[in-house]
Image (cartoon, grey):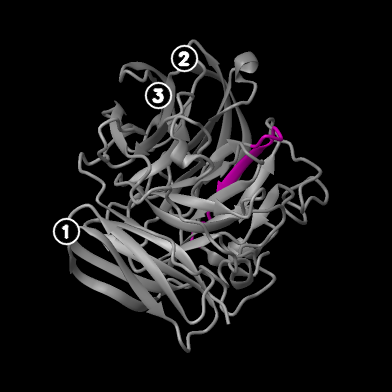
């Protein structure tokens, strides 16, 4: 576990290589007409298989052509509230075994809360349809609560299947090693349990520890991703109302819920701190996540991209600058990538573009570079925020910014808990270069964040007061 303040005492470089965004992006509709889509995976032939919350999984081409219904769960599905057909992934050896895994909430009769289960079913794809269903994970939900019941499924580069599960609305579940709720699990592709899991005791998840647990202390970790750079695992986490988190997932660690939401205050070495938090009261409800790895969009290389399922002012897709190479277990800055909201799942395509699934719009989007110098709203990108200098600093630091056009600017400072600490600028400013100075005399040492807001966009930079 890192001490957040100590780890932040580094000289940080500027997020962008020029005064404005080094690359602009537009969004395109790839598949439309979906009903509450949740997750998707690409197939080797370029087609995409998409789960739809209230029914099942269907296959489409990237030319918006329906191919087939892969599987329909409606005869035994609970799709109330946050339940339904959720995660999906292909086996790493799909080209030879044709296995596809789907994560859903089962009940018989449909939508019964008295007998509902979280299940992962392995299908064998045959001519774009599912055959030979095999249940490899089945967990009885023991409460009638219909939220925080699921997440997603992905294979790690170790060939193991990882499963994220919410705490089912019972916060104490997250700290219990005797059940899988509020955890990320790790199993073999046939449902058996690897003996090198951190809490493995007897191989029987119903006796002693739940041997499938990889990490615990999570509230509702909706999605996670493996880096193609170094095998690191990153996960989004939905907080109650004060903080959402992005976590660096490490074998056997405790992520603190319900004792901590956001950064633990006071610091508690028993709990793994988040990489970064998003503060309330309007939380983005973080969902899909990926580590971008392609030279197609070089400005995003090795950046963490996180989506939001909310549609309000903070419901963007964000880009986060990773630090502490080669481990990349810190986030040194975050800003909005595109104004695309109500997104549940992100994937990088083999073409190097980013694909995002809109649960409210029913659209699978493609995010690609713009050749016209405009952003996804067909508007110029109009501002930038430089890294403060010096950094670390005591007692004052200067922050430069740039505007392509005149407009209302707000530059504020927040502490590490996301609470407003100071407002450095609030008013209309002309186009061109500008700067503000923060005098931190009498301010405690620690990590602070400078946020610039212009029109409907914002950028953040991390700053360190060191005395």
Q: Is residue 142 magenta?
A: no
Question: Few, some or many C-alpha atoms within 10 Å of disc 3 (few <14, some 14-19, many ≥20)?
Answer: many
Q: Determine the secondary structure under disc 3.
A: strand
Q: Which residues are magenta?
A: 156-169
Image coords of residue 183 (percent x, y): 61, 54
Residue 79 sits in quarter: top left
Q: Which residue is mark 1?
A: 406
Q: Which residue is mark 3?
A: 58
Left or right side of 336 for 463: right
Q: Gap in Å between the C-alphas at discs 2 and 3? A: 9 Å
What label does residue 13 carry, if any? none
Residue placed furthest toward the bottom: 442
Quadrant including the N terminus: bottom right
Pointer 2 or 1: first along the chain: 2
Pointer 3 or 1: first along the chain: 3
Q: Which residue is mark 2?
A: 128
Q: Gap in Å between the C-alphas at discs 3 and 1? A: 48 Å
């Amino acid at each position: 576990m890192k001490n957040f303040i100590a780890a932040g005492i580094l000289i940080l470089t500027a997020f962008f290589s020029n005064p404005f965004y080094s690359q602009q992006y537009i969004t395109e509709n790839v598949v439309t007409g979906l009903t509450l889509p949740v997750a998707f995976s690409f197939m080797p032939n370029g087609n995409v298989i998409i789960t739809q919350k209230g029914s099942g999984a269907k296959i489409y081409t990237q030319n918006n052509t329906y191919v087939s219904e892969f599987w329909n769960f409606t005869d035994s599905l609970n799709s109330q509230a946050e339940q339904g057909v959720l995660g999906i992934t292909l086996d790493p050896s799909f080209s030879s075994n044709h296995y596809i895994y789907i994560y859903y909430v089962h009940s018989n009769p449909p939508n019964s809360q008295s007998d509902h289960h979280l299940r992962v079913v392995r299908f064998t794809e045959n001519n774009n349809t599912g055959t030979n269903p095999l249940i490899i994970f089945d967990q009885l939900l023991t409460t009638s609560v219909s939220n925080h019941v699921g997440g997603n499924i992905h294979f790690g580069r170790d060939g193991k299947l990882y499963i994220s599960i919410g705490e089912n609305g019972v916060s104490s579940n997250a700290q219990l090693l005797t059940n899988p709720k509020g955890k990320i699990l790790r199993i073999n592709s046939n449902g058996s349990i690897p003996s090198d899991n951190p809490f493995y005791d007897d191989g029987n998840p119903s006796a002693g520890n739940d041997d499938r647990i990889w990490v615990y202390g999570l509230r509702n970790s909706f999605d996670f991703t493996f880096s193609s750079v170094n095998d690191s695992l990153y996960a989004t986490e939905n907080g109650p109302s004060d903080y959402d988190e992005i976590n660096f997932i490490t074998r056997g660690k405790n992520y603190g819920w319900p004792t901590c939401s956001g950064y633990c205050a006071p610091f508690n070495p028993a709990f793994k701190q988040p990489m970064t938090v998003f503060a309330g009261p309007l939380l983005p409800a973080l969902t899909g996540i990926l580590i971008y790895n392609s030279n197609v969009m070089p400005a995003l290389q090795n950046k963490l991209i996180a989506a939001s399922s909310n549609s309000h002012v903070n419901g963007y897709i964000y880009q986060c600058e990773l630090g502490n190479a080669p481990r990349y277990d810190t986030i040194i800055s975050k800003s909005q990538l595109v104004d695309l909201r109500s997104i549940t799942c992100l994937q990088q395509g083999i073409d190097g573009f980013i694909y995002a699934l809109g649960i409210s719009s029913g659209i699978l989007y493609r995010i690609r570079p713009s050749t016209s110098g405009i952003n996804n709203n067909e508007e110029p990108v109009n501002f930038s925020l430089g890294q403060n200098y010096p950094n670390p600093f005591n007692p004052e630091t200067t922050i430069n910014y740039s505007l392509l056009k005149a407009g209302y600017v707000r530059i504020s400072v927040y502490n590490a808990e996301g609470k407003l600490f100071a407002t450095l600028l609030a008013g209309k400013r002309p186009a061109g270069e500008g700067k503000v100075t923060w005098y931190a005399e009498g301010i405690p040492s620690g990590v602070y964040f400078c946020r610039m807001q212009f029109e409907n966009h914002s950028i953040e930079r991390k700053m360190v007061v060191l005395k």
